[in-house]
Image (cartoon, rainbow, N blue to C red):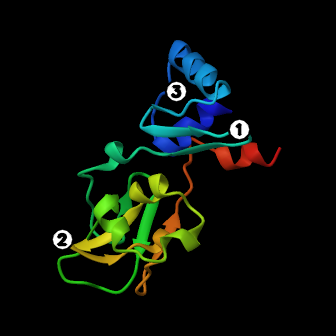
């Protein structure tokens, strides 16, 4: 299940190698947080959160409406010169209501946002919609959400 989750969140074409996956599983069981396959694994006593690693999406930019990081599409009003890129730490500071999202800061910093140059236009997952919404797209080769239903 961990292998599939890492592939789904990180978007890799290949699963992590057995030894790396084994070390990650040992670390998680010991309560250590770590990174693997472009993902952050945040271990807590009763939960494991797997989120995109911010470094893995830095510099990745697409036009609004295009698929960002293989999983997200941001849809909203036309804005001249807008691009979709990671929210990052600086963008998160511009989202005063981000805690209401229920998502940790580490996840939000790696989430998609709409930028016009250095101006933050929208960060839907962090509560700054401004008429925009984020769609999580299905991944044909990875049906991790279906695994959770069983």
Please give the name of the residue rendered at 62% of the width and 23% of the height, measured from the top-left corner. 25
Q: Which badge, 2 or 1, is on the more N-terminal residue?
A: 1
Q: Tell me the tag on residue 8.
A: none
Question: Based on the displayed image, in which of its 4 quarters is residue 55 positioned?
Answer: top left
Residue 42 picture quarter: top right
* Rendering coords of residue 114 (x, y %): 32, 72
- In the drawing, what numbered circle is on residue 118? 2
The residue shown at (39%, 60%) is 67
Q: Secondary structure at mark 3?
A: loop
Mark nearer the viewer, 3 or 1: 1
Q: Is any part of residue 60 visible from this angle?
A: yes
Q: Position of residue 147 (x, y in %)?
A: 74, 42
Q: Regarding mark 2 in the picture, which secondary structure is present there?
A: loop
Q: Pick the quarter of the image with the C terminus.
A: top right
**CB within 8 Å, label 3 to label 1:** no
Marks 2 and 1 sit apart, C-alpha to C-alpha, by 39 Å
The earlier-in-sequence mark between 3 and 1 is 3
Of tags 2 and 1, the one toward the viewer is: 1
Along the horizontal axis of the image, is 55 left or right of 146? Answer: left
Would residue 79 be found to the left or right of residue 148 on screen?
left
Which one is in front, 120 or 133?
120
Q: Position of residue 72 (x, y in %)?
A: 45, 61
Point out the image quarter for the N terminus. top right
Quadrant of the rendered image containing residue 26: top right
Looking at the rendered structure, which numbered label has been put on residue 15? 3
Q: Position of residue 110 (x, y in %)?
A: 40, 54
- Taking 49 as reference, is 72 above or below it? below
Would residue 71 be seen by someone viewing this image from the given angle? no
Q: Which mark is residue 45?
A: 1
Disc 2 residue crowd, few under 14, some 14–19, many 20+, Cα 10 Å = few
């Amino acid at each position: 299940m961990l292998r599939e989750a890492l592939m789904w969140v990180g978007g890799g074409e290949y699963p992590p190698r057995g030894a790396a996956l084994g070390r990650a599983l040992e670390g998680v069981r010991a309560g250590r947080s770590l990174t693997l396959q472009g993902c952050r694994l945040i271990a807590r006593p009763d939960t494991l959160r797997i989120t995109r690693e911010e470094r893995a999406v830095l510099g990745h930019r697409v036009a609004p409406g295009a698929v960002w990081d293989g999983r997200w599409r941001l849809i909203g009003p036309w804005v001249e010169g807008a691009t979709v890129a990671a929210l990052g730490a600086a963008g998160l500071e511009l989202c005063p209501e981000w805690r209401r999202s229920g998502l940790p800061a580490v996840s939000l910093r790696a989430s998609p946002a709409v930028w016009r140059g250095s101006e933050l236009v929208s960060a839907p997952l962090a509560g700054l919609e401004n008429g925009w919404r984020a769609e999580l797209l299905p991944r044909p080769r990875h049906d991790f959400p279906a695994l959770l239903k069983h």
